[in-house]
Image (tube, rainbow, N blue to C red):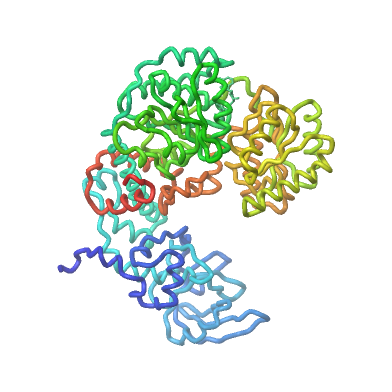
Amino acid sequence: MLPGTPRPERLDLSVDVLTGVGPTVKKKLAKLGLRTIGDALAYRPHRYEPAAPERRITELFGEDEAVIAGEVRSTRLQRARRLKLVKARVADATGEITAVWFNQAWLADRLVPGMQVRLRGSLRGREFAVRSYDLDGVASTADFAPVYPATEEVSVKKLREVVAGALGYARDVVDPLPAALTAAAALPDRADAVVALHRPRREADGERARRRLAFDELLVLQLGLARRREGREEERATPLGAPGELVERYRTVLPFRLTPDQERAIGEIDADLAGEVPMERLLQGDVGSGKTVVALYALLRAVETGHRGALMAPTETLAEQHFLTIEPICLELGVVCALLTRSVKHDVAQAALVVGTHALIQEGVDLGDLAVAVVDEQHRFGVEQRAAIKAGRRPHTLHMTATPIPRTLALTVYGDLSVTEIAKPPANRKPIVTSWISEERASEAYRRLTRLLKEGRQAYVVCPLIEQSETSRARAAEQEAERLQRGELRGFRVGCLHGRLRPDARRELMARFNAGDLDVLVATTVIEVGVDVANATVMIVQEADRFGLAQLHQLRGRVGRGAEQSYCLLVSRRKEELTESAQARLDALVATTDGFELAEVDLELRGEGQLMGTRQSGLTDFRFARLRADRDLLEQAREVAEQLVDYQGPLNDEVDALFAEHDLAA
Ligand code: ADP
Ligand code: MG
């Protein structure tokens, strides 16, 4: 092989081919995910040291960071109380100074007289306190030296050493993109980007390198999504024509007029249903924005054309809740509606409309007959129902989510879906008034709550999230309900809702709360989704600082569902005990009820990978991409992916790997 020809297979070599990496270090690196040379090359610095001027020793002044270079004259080890100090006299052409290292006693033996060193640090009195140093070459003291995420076991210094070694293989990195494309997109070559990531000459070089690598990441994702879209073009659904008499009656049966956003959503759905290409649409809207009404419309479109509609929910509770909402309307319309869960199994054969859990519907319904499927709150990359659809036509599918996702994130996670947003809730809603107080004033919250109870309203009290298992959470909730019944809520009718109730007990409890036979539901987070009682207008969340932003927003959505003014009272631990991020979450909730705005805040606070459960999808575990900053790159990657669906090259393996876990059909 010619010298200089890349040998990408060398990137798969284990890190222990590098000097300084033995079995012990190898194990520690593995914990950081660094197993191969390629892994080390892709290890992203989380920042770079700022530039510091190189100074002659006699010209050092002030306490600003500076770099000096010189020769070791002498070394000694000194103890000062518990500290061990290594002190070395270092000289350059202009003078001498004592350099000090803290707690690195072993250095005393390495710093031998005559050795050339380069030190980065600052003056402390008459001595030079060393922050980083190089005994050979320049890696740690350089301007923009990379700072890697380190652990107690593996120091930044060690990581620099490992990456420096791996950089010897940088020329084995091949560019997966056609040269014409990188040129057109004004992106650096991939190998150059890898080098610049670790050895930027300017701050901007590091960022440019990151963006190139981020582009590759986003492209892999978009290629996968584009293929999925493409794959669907072959599939056929039953075209449902124009809206008919049943949905006309449905509109008149509803006790309200549809909002403009609902009308727009319905218009988009009708357009999809008219065609043979299966609908793949995401209906996104905040809790209480009126999605279910739209979803039922889509289901009735299936029914009126002599087919079936199915509404699939992730949990039994949600399925039951949907059934309770939908059944009375169906009854009025003369549509037979069935519930299908683990504990309730209506006769599905007779039903035109089936509500149930995902799994059961997939097993229990003849999908050939299913013209419209509504999938509620199911993360798309969990179980793809596509696997269940073997031959014949597939249903038009409406994915419904109350988790507001910022536009950029929707483009990544739902990049192959059309998106409909219900942004404005029905106009008769008053925004929920949210306040935040800390626990020493919790009694005020209960006073406000009981005042509303006396006016005939109902309430939720959400228990803290401390307990790990569902069973211990259930027990804690029951104890809390008893405590409140004897204390703050004496004289009111208190029920307790948790995940360990048997389905019939839960149904009965909900029915009593619905009917106003209970004043307060003390609950675990199981009320997060699905519970819909318009007269419940106040909620207390205990130890609200323990909850995530998205979860608090979902919880809060249980109130404010009718025309009455609603309140959400967040009780946190003492403010001094809270992390900055917890305070920011609670502040944000007080400031706004807009789910999309909160999603943006969440994105800011937590980083994209962990947003609202998207982490489990794996599809947004980006190493280099930052969705907020890289919106343009994302759009670009999407366009490029469209042109590259037939692309055959090194990114293919990555696409396959990324999507294999998520697509049963793949
Ligand atoms: P989502 O599914 O988005 O959480 P729902 O469809 O369950 O919201 O609607 C929440 C509440 O608002 C329900 O009680 C519903 O009857 C009511 N609602 C829905 N659409 C309207 C509307 N256009 N006008 C008034 N109330 C509405
Ligand atoms: Mg709903």
Residue 556: x %, y % from top left? 64, 36
What residue lies at 43% left-to-right and 69% top-to-bottom?
29
Q: Does residue 430 appear left or right of residue 74 in this picture?
A: right
Residue located farthest toward the left when viewing the structure as drawn: 2
Can residue 435 be seen at all in this image of the molecule? Answer: no
Quadrant of the drawing holding the N terminus = bottom left
Which image quarter: residue 558? top right
Numbered label tally: 0
Residue 28: x %, y % from top left? 46, 71
56 or 271, nearer to the observer: 271
Residue 233: x %, y % from top left? 28, 33
138 or 92, nearer to the observer: 138
* Figure check: 81 above or below 8: below
Residue 617: x %, y % from top left? 44, 47
What residue lies at 65% left-to-right and 24% top-to-bottom?
562
Q: Does residue 523 appear left or right of residue 300 in this picture?
A: right
* Figure check: 241 above or below 481: above
What residue lies at 42% left-to-right and 55% top-to-bottom?
203
Which image quarter: residue 202? bottom left
Q: Does residue 280 appear left or right of residue 463 in this picture?
A: left
* Figure check: 162 above or below 489: below
